[in-house]
Image: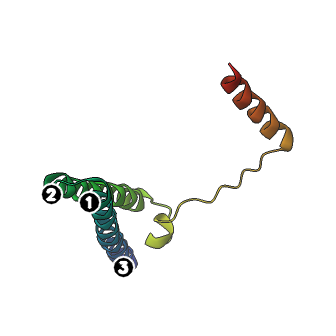
Amino acid sequence: MEKKKSDDVNSKWDACLDITARRVVYSSLGGAFAGLLFFRSPVTRWASIAFGAGLGIGSAYTDCSRAFDASSSSSASAALVAPISTETSSPSSVSQVNRKFLFAFAL
């Protein structure tokens, strides 16, 4: 039993390190692209890269903390995937929402 618990923690750490590395790299690249597209000064370009890296780290931290706090999950990858919604809405409730939405913008 102790071996399985250790393997579960190790797999969660592996998944968290993987998702952290990917999100930091991808969001930094997104920040670099946005910096090149929108800013002329090197300082603001570096700031947009840092902002993107911060978004990636924050997003990865949130998902990893959910993975470690989930006690009923059977695997780390299941805890890192967004839950699937099983709710279905009836057409009448959708039309009520549309009416409220249209009424709010008609004023």
Badge 3: residue crowd in 10 Å (few <14, some 14–19, many ≥20): few
Mark closest to the chain's N terminus, 2 or 3 = 3
- Among numbered discs 2 and 1, the one appearing first in the sequence: 2
- Asked which secondary structure carries label 2, the reply is helix
Pointers 2 and 1 in contact (CB under 8 A)? no
Residue at 27%, 63% in the rendered image: 32
In the displayed orientation, state which residue is furthest to the top.
Answer: 107
Viewer can see residue 75: no
Q: Quote the CA–CA distance across marks 2 and 1.
A: 17 Å
Q: Closer to the camera: disc 2 or disc 1?
A: 2
Residue at mark 2: 42
- Relative side of 92 to 81, left or right: right
Answer few, some or many: residues within 10 Å of disc 1's Cα (few below 14, many 20 plus, some between 14 and 19).
many
Q: Which residue is mark 1?
A: 53
Q: CA distance from mark 2 to mark 3?
A: 45 Å
Q: Earlier in the sequence, mark 1 or mark 3?
A: 3
In the rendered structure, the answer to whether residue 102 lies left or right of residue 53 reads: right
Nearest-to-viewer mark from 1 and 3 = 1
Front residue of 55/38: it is 38
Residue underneath mark 3 = 7
Few, some or many residues within 10 Å of mark 2 (<14, 14–19, 20+) = few
Quadrant of the drawing holding the N terminus: bottom left
